[in-house]
Image (tube, rainbow, N blue to C red):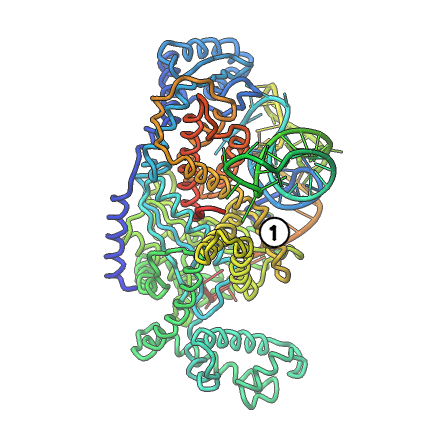
Amino acid sequence: MREREAVALRDRVIADTHARPRQAFAAYPLPKLRALVAEALNRESGQTGLRPQLDFTDRQKLGGDLAIKVPELLKQGGAANYIKTHVPWIVQALSAEGFASIFAHVEAKGMYVNVRLTDRFLLQSLSSVLELERAFGFSDAEAARSVVVDYSSPNVAKQLHAGHIRSTIIGHVLCNLHAAAGARVFRVNHINDFGGFGFTLEGYRRWNDTFTADMSPNDKLLKLYAIRRSLERSAAHEGPLHTLAAEDKQIIDEYLEGAGSKDELRVKYETFVTASDGAFEQLEAGDPKQVAFWQELVAFSVAEFQKFYDALGVTIDFTLGESFYFKAGNELVEAALASGKAVLFTKELGAAAKARADQLLAEKSKLMTEPLHAAALLQIEKDIGAVVIPLPNDERLVVRRSDGRSIYATRDLGAIALRRRLFNPTDITYVVGQEQQLHFERLFKAAEVLGLVKSGDGHDLALEHLFFGFYVDAKTGKKLSSREGASNVYLLLQSATEHFARKYQDDPAWTKADVDETAKQLAVGSVVFNDLKKDMKGAVEISSDDLSVTMTAFEKSGGAYVVYAACRARSILRKFQGELEKPEALPDVELTAEEVDLILKLQQIPEKIVDAADQGNPSVLVRHLLDTATVYNSYYTHSPVLKDGDVRMHRLLITAAVCRALENALRICHIECPQKI
RNA sequence: GUCCCCGUAGCUCAGUUGGAUAGAGCGUCUGCCUUCUAAGCAGAGGGUCGCAGGUUCGAGUCCUGCCGGGGACGCCA
């Protein structure tokens, strides 16, 4: 993608944002209630800074729906004092006339003021769900934010590995959450189409002719990568040639003809590396032949990634490779060199850094122990000759190799600068595995040093690395290797689809098209759900040899459970076929504890969406949906909805609200509800 | 060695940012399909919140130190 296209797409994304349905967050029933309570307590106490806390409680267990306390007052004089001097007037204030239509009962219990909501308030709140329809859950809470989310980010000419898959799912849903919360969202796929590419260019030139005709372009790229890694291993191998692994030996015979000894191998390998570096230099310099060739190779890989995105149904608006940013990165380095913020790390600077390390060691500083000192010296030695940005704490970030070429840090800095210019964001969030924490920590510090972002409280752009745990092998608990990762998830999607299809294919009530559609929705849904339901920092287990183990894990994960609840609600409404009445037209009846619980669960959804977006943690919403489904599944078995009686329409309205709320929220989580399951 | 993540029921995880008697799902056991889809419902059992100190009226939650599991520590990305 070129800059001009990116600008046009950006403008389209902004226009789409403005066209989105959006409900004022403060107009939802619960935020409105919180504001009312806060206002009343501040007025009563003559203060302004009180932010009363409203916690949901179990009516059957504690007698109320909400427990209210005021942390600010509680901290002032401790619990005993709070109960004696504050609780009584809080009870008074909340029992006032103005709250009569909202609170049916106000009662002090220890440090809490427990309130029970009126049935009228609860029933009326259903209209926020029913009238907003597809817009329920959406709000303007983050309207002032403009968020760039960097996710998926695969490497061209390599397999999509497990980390990219989690990044893709989590990043995509995080974008949905921010969008639902009212932010401008720019979905960016930062593909690595530059680093290590010299090998690919040179390898393709050398060995393309030796590949068989049935290999797809992408197969060839993967093969080149395999050859390169194998040669790398062989060249670094300590013993003589015949002690190499058979597959590495075979690669040498096939691709480095005449390398009969270890020394010959090293020479030939070095020649290959030098030629590769040369090819990369030409590419960086903009050599038209190399650039055209490179573009062709990148296109092969990107087409392959697209297959995976299609299978998952995920969209990423801006596919911008490192190549898009590298000029900006180089310009940044030049400017930094001119201003002195970046320096050529000379022998003299190295000696000075060593002296500081020695001094810290002599002072027995906690920051510099014996092994740390040794590592620091080694690193100083390595960095001599490169261009670095000095960071606080005697750290350095290398931004240009000693041979003058850029590295990923250069391009990542360029990316920040360019994204600022292009998107003017308030946040850039990187959804990348935890193994890159150190890199991002240093990158963000360097961005501050360069003045790309303002540091401290007045910061104008929040850079955040949102990391997640790995897919790990269910048996060993170890990180899945790159090769296993992608093929596993492909297989998993495929076998999950077959698994779900098997449940319906023999049923005459199902057409083939219905079976396929439903099976795919359930398969994608369960993979996604399994990834999202836990806090993302933990590892997700996957079984590498027995997919049925992983499949059952998905069955148990609860995705189907939530979808089932929504389907049942929809099915009941289908059967009803009549007109729903308005909540205000319903006669007064006493709501059951389950109904109260359920209605309050629905009303929390808009807040949970905002919380999940703000915390960068989709599981906040997913778990709430699981809770909601639990209550509804229990509800319709105990309270037959379509049974004739006074409460039939009440139950129908609750069912309609559940259906709508779950569908909307699940869609934000990238889970579609089939018509029936 | 240094830094980061994790440690809560047999297993997988919550625990609303320091507050009520620590909660779910799965698994186990026991019931429920002439009544809107049993991918469901009801019930039982299951706990030294890794260990040891500390702060606090109050700690699973905050601080310090240990123990165990995983990860990072490249002029790769």
* Three-letter amino acid code of the residue under disc 1: Thr
Q: Nearer the viewer, residue A142 or A407?
A: A142
Quarter of the image for residue A89 reads top left
**Residue at point 51% right, 76% down?**
A228
In this rendering, the answer to whether A583 lies above or below A232 is: above
- Image coordinates of residue A31 in percent, x first then y, are 38, 27
Quarter of the image for residue B58 reads top right
**Residue at point 47% right, 13% down?**
A106
Please name the residue that numbered disc 1 is placed on: A552
In this view, the residue farthest toward the bottom is: A258
**Residue at point 39% right, 26% down?**
A30
Q: Nearer the viewer, residue A541 or A47?
A: A541
**Residue at point 60% right, 54% down?**
A550
In which quadrant is the N terminus of chain A drawn?
Answer: bottom left
Q: Is the residue marked by circle 1 packed among few (<14), some (14-19), or many (20+) residues within 10 Å? A: few
Decide if residue A323 is on the left or right side of residue A370: left
- Image coordinates of residue A158 in percent, x first then y, are 47, 69
In this rendering, the answer to whether A25 lies above or below A51 is: below
Chain identity of mark 1: A
Decide if residue A406 is on the left or right side of residue A497: left
Q: Is residue A395 visible?
A: no
Decide if residue A580 is on the left or right side of residue A381: left
- Image coordinates of residue A183 in percent, x first then y, are 33, 42
Q: Is residue A271 visible?
A: yes
In this rendering, the answer to whether A615 lies above or below A438 is: above
Q: Nearer the viewer, residue A475 or A642?
A: A642
- Image coordinates of residue A357 in percent, x first then y, are 54, 55
Total labels: the figure holds: 1
Q: Secondary structure at mark 1?
A: helix
